[in-house]
């Protein structure tokens, strides 16, 4: 969709999603290191699952930097779209890595194919609440960033000039 010349919202949405995804991936790596130190005695181990998430973080940053470092918006959009095609290859690697690689990490706590979760009720409730909270925060951050990107890109149009002052 990003390569389609008439798709105007898709590149802006990708530009809004990537920083939030990078932040969430960084938080997963950082909190994992904080938890891993007392559990395994090391901040980082070169585990296949951890390395896949680190690769995902690097790809998020790469997408953001490709879009930021190219001055021409059309070229930045096209380069970002081509880079996103490369990034898509990492998605199954990270997602299915929980099932593919046996490592020091436990398996998936939630499995949609399994009838019953592997977590006790209170832990499951807390995990689902945390998922919902991060989901709502992520959606709000992405929508706020998307709004800013649209207003920046359309700054010279009449509808933006008619907006009340002080309402970015």
Image: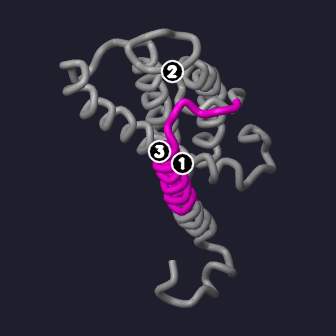
Q: Are marks 2 and 3 in contact (CB under 8 Å)?
A: no
Q: Residue 159: x and y, percent?
A: 68, 80
Mark 1 lies on a secondary structure that is helix
Q: In the visual, does 27 lie left or right of 85? A: left
Disc nearest the viewer among 1 and 3: 1
**Residue 35 makes an appearance in the image:** yes
Q: In the visual, does 124 lie left or right of 46? A: right
Q: Which disc is residue 167 wearing?
A: none
Task: Tell me which residue sits at (54%, 26%) in the image.
Answer: 108
Badge 1 is on which residue? 128
Other residues around mark 1 within 10 Å, as few (<14) / some (14–19) / many (≥20): few
N-term-proximal mark, 1 vs 2: 2
When asked about the image quadrant of residue 65, the answer is top left
When asked about the image quadrant of residue 140, the answer is bottom right
Q: Gap between marks 2 and 3, in whole Å?
A: 37 Å
Q: Which quadrant of the rendered structure holds the N terminus? A: top right
N-term-proximal mark, 2 vs 3: 3
**Residue 19 makes an appearance in the image:** no
Is residue 119 depicted above or below 68 in this figure? above
Other residues around mark 2 within 10 Å, as few (<14) / some (14–19) / many (≥20): some
Q: Residue 71: x and y, percent?
A: 50, 46
Please provide the residue range marked out in magenta: 115-142
């Amino acid at each position: 969709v990003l390569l389609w010349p008439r798709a105007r919202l898709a590149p802006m949405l990708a530009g809004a999603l990537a920083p939030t995804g990078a932040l969430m991936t960084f938080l997963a790596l950082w909190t994992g290191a904080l938890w891993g130190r007392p559990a395994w005695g090391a901040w980082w181990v070169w585990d296949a699952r951890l390395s896949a998430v680190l690769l995902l973080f690097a790809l998020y940053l790469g997408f953001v930097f490709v879009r930021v470092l190219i001055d021409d918006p059309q070229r930045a959009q096209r380069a970002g779209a081509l880079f996103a095609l490369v990034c898509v290859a990492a998605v199954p690697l990270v997602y299915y890595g929980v099932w593919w690689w046996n490592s020091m990490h436990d398996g998936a706590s939630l499995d949609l194919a399994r009838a019953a979760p592997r977590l006790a009720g209170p832990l499951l409730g807390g995990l689902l609440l945390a998922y919902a909270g991060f989901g709502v925060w992520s959606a709000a951050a992405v929508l706020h960033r998307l709004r800013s990107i649209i207003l920046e890109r359309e700054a010279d149009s009449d509808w933006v000039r008619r907006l009340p002052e002080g309402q970015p």
